[in-house]
Amino acid sequence: MGKEASIVVLEPETTVKDTVNLKLPEFYVSRDLSMLQFNRRVLELALDEGTPLLERLRFLCISSTNLDEFFEIRVAGHMQKAEAGAKQAGPDSIKPKDLLKSISVVAHELVDEQYRVLNTVLFPALAKENIRFIRRRELSQKQEAWIRSYFDEALLPVLSPLGLDPAHPFPRILNKSLNFIISLKGKDAFGRGGVMAIVQAPRSLPRITQLPPEETDGGPYDFVFLSSIIHAYVDELFPGMKVTGCYQFRVTRNSDLYVDEEEVDDLLRALEGELPSRRYGDEVRVEVADDAPEDIVNFLLHKFGLTEDDSYLVNGPVNLNRLIAVCDIVDRPDLKYPPFTPSLPIKMNPGCDLFEAIRDNDYLLHHPFESFVPVIEFLRQAANDKNVLAIKQTLYRTGPESAVVDALVTAAQNAKEVTVIIELRARFDEAENIALATRLQESGAHVVYGVVGYKTHAKMILVVRREGRTLRRYVHLGTGNYHPRTTRLYTDYGLFTSDKAMGKDAHQVFMQMTSLGKGKELNKMLQSPFSLYDGLIERIERETENAKQGKPARIIAKMNGLTEKYVIQTLYKASMAGVQIDLIIRGVCCLKPEIPGVSDNIRVRSIMGQFLEHTRVFYFENNGNQEVFLSSADWMDRNLHRRVETAFPVESKKLRRRLVNELGYYLKDNTQMWRMLEDGNYEQALPGNEAPFSAQDALLREFSDA
């Protein structure tokens, strides 16, 4: 298994202070400002010269996409609260209006930095590798001729310039679409003196076009922006008039969907009806070319009902995230992460009887270092096994072309009892999930949309198989989605087991979601919104009591986010009692570590690397009787109180040791780790006198050697 990075159980420092008011706002970080901090760390990966160049460009695009979603959901929600006069504040006590001001300041700095990185760092570095984004003034004669032909044949026929006058009001602008506002002089064929017009870029055409080298005598990877082509020939859209200015802009809208589940009879139909409104929700941000005159910017702000704080002047393409297409177009393996082949446990290789393997032992898979193929093969074997009677599965994000869904369809067609719980409200995947639900229903599967008022976020497969005179349950439980593509990009754990108690627990959770009535108490698993929150609090408090008694006390929790107020307060109390606490939190963290007298014993790390850290692992020392849970849930309000989630113990000593060892890798990381400071800011770790160590690189090496 390679060199171990073991976890050291530190002796507790018992300095309990009962007089500290843990509700004080200075002990909490704003969730939204923490989210922007995470996005800043993503952007820092674009500056890391140790990261392959095209991957750096990809990270820049990811930071832009993340920011889009942040405005579409988080900022939009705060705007609604502010407009309603809400004074409700989180544990940080920042009111909606004040929070929007703070967000604007930080987001403007972040956007300015994104374009600085693009223009002064990445574009020059890419040009040195002959990956060029050609500006209009740099076009050769052949390139200009090709672009002219492209404009005439592909672009001009689908453009519809809209003059603005009493008969032509300002058009509805699609969410995040590319548009141009044009200033004009002169009169048209009807004698109208136009001042302004809007040109909407067609959605059917790519935002970046690769120039064919055989026709333009250019390099193999010369690109031109659609905005540059429109700029070059925009005057031809207004014959007889003079174009005095052309400025690209983009508006971001509220994209949260509202469906009153208590009042609808069919959630699928209700969501289908609501999806189109996402394109035209309330405006929350406008991005405009930074050379646009002040009166143009003010005109757009007035039309969208926004303020100066909501405008972002950008030095480059307003749809920055579209650059990610270049990362896939350019065939330069030397500028990308090296390819790797995920490993497979010997008894889970294709062709092996997975039911026999799981019957003998529990199996743990760590994606993407280990292959997702056994999960798909498990479903395929179940679908075609004459002894399998039923398959139950939850689906949150799966993807439009899914081998998982193919296997479920096959199972239904083979007369298995197939029950699928699809979370239709998986944000931005609603349309795909509706299509999947329809396909499964048509195959004969029972499709359920979860529980009214609670998103189904648990990741579970339950297979019921007849073996002789008995029925045996086989279970797969995961920390991430059943999405074959993201299993190559996200780190996640999946556990296979045929343990009777775990099988009964999984069955009980499925019964809760598909039937009616009160559920029975689970044997081993923890489930939100019922036992997961209480189970976590109980275990943190147990560590606290152990520390007070001088017993070994340690908590290590790896997750994506920590926001739940009382969980944070309970962690503070544990720290004050001397419990050593390591939190490995990729994204949002509202807890402040290393506050004297409060969180001295808490350390917070964020790992940023090639893969998106998505595993949820909870370790409790328990006076030497270690407990390790894997979970679909973060320690956030929504996961613990408003979703159906599971946390499940890893009981195999061998697998538990492995998980503890892998947690040790993340604690040892000194190259891709960011340390959270007492004030809520982050600083990047540097190896110093220690040998450089990356958890993700170590896991890649370890599993490639397995």
Image (cartoon, rainbow, N blue to C red):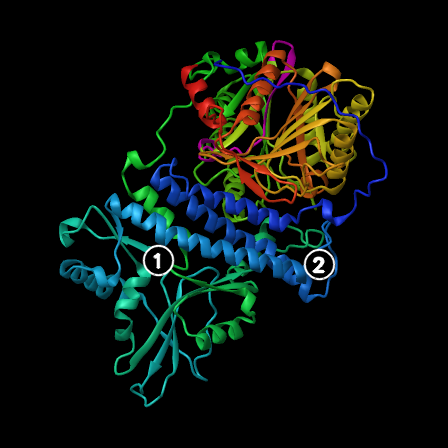
Q: Position of residue 462 (x, y in %)?
A: 60, 25
Label 1 sits on a secondary structure element that is loop
Q: Please identify the quadrant where the C terminus is shown.
A: top left
How far across and how far down the image is residue 521, in percent? Answer: 78, 26
Q: Residue at x 35, y 57 (%)?
A: 204
Dividing the picture into quarters, in which one does residue 643 lie?
Answer: top right
Q: Which mark is residue 204?
A: 1
Visible residue check, residue 201 = yes
User: Is 362 displayed left or right of 17 in the figure?
Assistant: left
Rendered residue at 18%/58% (across/down): 143
Q: Amino acid at mark 2?
A: Lys
Tell me where the magenta segment starts and ends, as one range. 467-488
Q: Secondary structure at mark 2?
A: loop
**Residue at label 2?**
95
Q: Residue 292 at what x, y percent from top left?
A: 40, 71
As for residue 470 lying within the magenta part, the answer is yes
Q: Are marks 1 and 2 in contact (CB under 8 Å)?
A: no
Q: Indicate whether 294 appears above or below 146.
A: below
Can residue 255 be seen by looking at this rendering? no
Counting residues from the N terminus, which is met first, the one under dot 1 or under dot 2? Answer: 2
- Where, by quadrant of the figure, is residue 647 drawn? top right
Q: What crowding class fits label 1: few (fewer than 14 Cα within 10 Å), some (14-19), or many (20 or more)?
A: few
Tell me the amino acid under the disc marked 1: Ser
Q: Residues within 10 Å of mark 2 (few under 14, many from 20)?
A: some
Query: Which residue is drawn at the image coordinates 80% and 19% (left, top)?
Result: 550
